[in-house]
Each structure stands twice: as C-alpha cells, then as structure tokens.
C-alpha cells in the first residue's frame, strides 16, 4: 500500500478528508505537509490527533530520506487547486488560474462538468476551460 493511501485511511478514521500531501522546503527546513478538510472546518484538536496517528506510520515508512518536520493543517482559505476534485469542492469560490498557453483567468468558479471548468470573469463573462489546459490554480479571498 502507498503511504498516501495509508494516511488517507487514518484521516478518514477521525472524520476528516485528505486534501493534499506535499514536501516543502522553508527556511532550510524540510516539511512534510498533510492538508485535511471537513465540512464544518478543521479544529486544532483534530490536527493534533491526526499528527499522533500519522507519526508512528512515518517512523516505519518515511516520506523522504533525511530530516523533516510533519505539519498537519487545513489547506486554508487560499489554497492550491491540483485535482478535479479540488475544483469541484471549490465551486462558488473565487479562483485564479493560468493555462499552459499563458492565459490568465480570475473570477467565481461556477461549475465543473467532466473535465470542463467554468469560471465567471469580470472582463469576459463566463469562460469554459479544459482542466488539462490549466497549469496552476488557487482559490483567493477578496478582503
């Protein structure tokens, strides 16, 4: 079994959903970040509980060689969108993305149908873009 699949089972065992895992380098530290979501939000206690569940697994199956720090958290209000599921979960939110042809879109995510993303932009109205054409995407919050 893969490490991410094992982590997903642990996350679901306490009523959360696995959003993403990633390896980051910040200030000369390597971080293994596990991002989780829940319909009512994620609490600090849930993050702590999940950290205690995942740590023994990582002792046996480390995500990388060398030293690293485990970080368990919510992906936040402004988060990367990497999968179709991420887009589907973000319908109704503000999104910003660019395509492999360097086009940029920003606006409200209206729908995800199959592999087609529909966004309502201020400048050009409703735009449909293939998920496969998107190179980088994130949600954003207007203050």
Image (cartoon, rainbow, N blue to C red):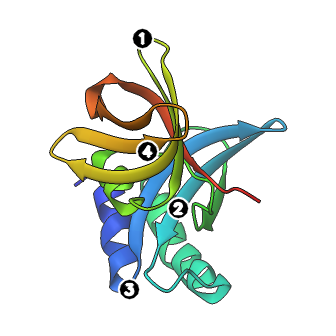
Q: Which mark is residue 101?
A: 1
Q: Which mark is residue 15?
A: 3
Res. 76 image quadrant: bottom right
Dot 4 corresponds to which residue? 120
> Which is more N-terminal, label 2 or label 3?
3
Dot 2 corresponds to which residue? 35
Report whether 116 appears left or right of 65: left
How dense is the environment of label 2, judged by Cα within 10 Å: few (below 14), some, or many (20 and up)?
some
Spatial CA distance of label 3 from label 2 is: 14 Å
Picture coordinates of residue 98 (x, y %)? 49, 26
> Which is more N-terminal, label 4 or label 3?
3
Spatial CA distance of label 3 from label 4 is: 33 Å
Q: State the residue lying farthest toward the top.
A: 101
Marks 4/1 in contact by CB < 8 Å: the verdict is no
> Which is more N-terminal, label 1 or label 4?
1
Q: Secondary structure at mark 3?
A: loop
Mark 4 vs mark 1: give the one in front. 4
How dense is the environment of label 1, judged by Cα within 10 Å: few (below 14), some, or many (20 and up)?
few
């Amino acid at each position: 079994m893969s490490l991410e699949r094992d982590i997903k089972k642990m996350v679901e065992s306490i009523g959360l959903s696995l959003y993403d895992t990633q390896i980051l380098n910040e200030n000369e530290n390597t971080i293994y970040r596990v991002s989780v979501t829940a319909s009512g939000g994620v609490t600090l206690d849930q993050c702590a509980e999940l950290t205690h569940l995942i740590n023994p697994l990582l002792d046996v199956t480390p995500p990388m060689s060398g030293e690293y720090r485990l970080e368990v958290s919510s992906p936040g209000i402004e988060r990367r969108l990497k999968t179709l599921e991420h887009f589907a979960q973000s319908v109704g939110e503000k999104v910003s993305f660019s395509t492999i042809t360097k086009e940029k879109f920003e606006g409200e995510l209206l729908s995800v149908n199959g592999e087609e993303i529909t966004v309502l932009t201020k400048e050009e109205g409703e735009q449909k873009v293939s998920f496969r054409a998107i190179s980088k995407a994130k949600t954003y919050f207007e203050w």
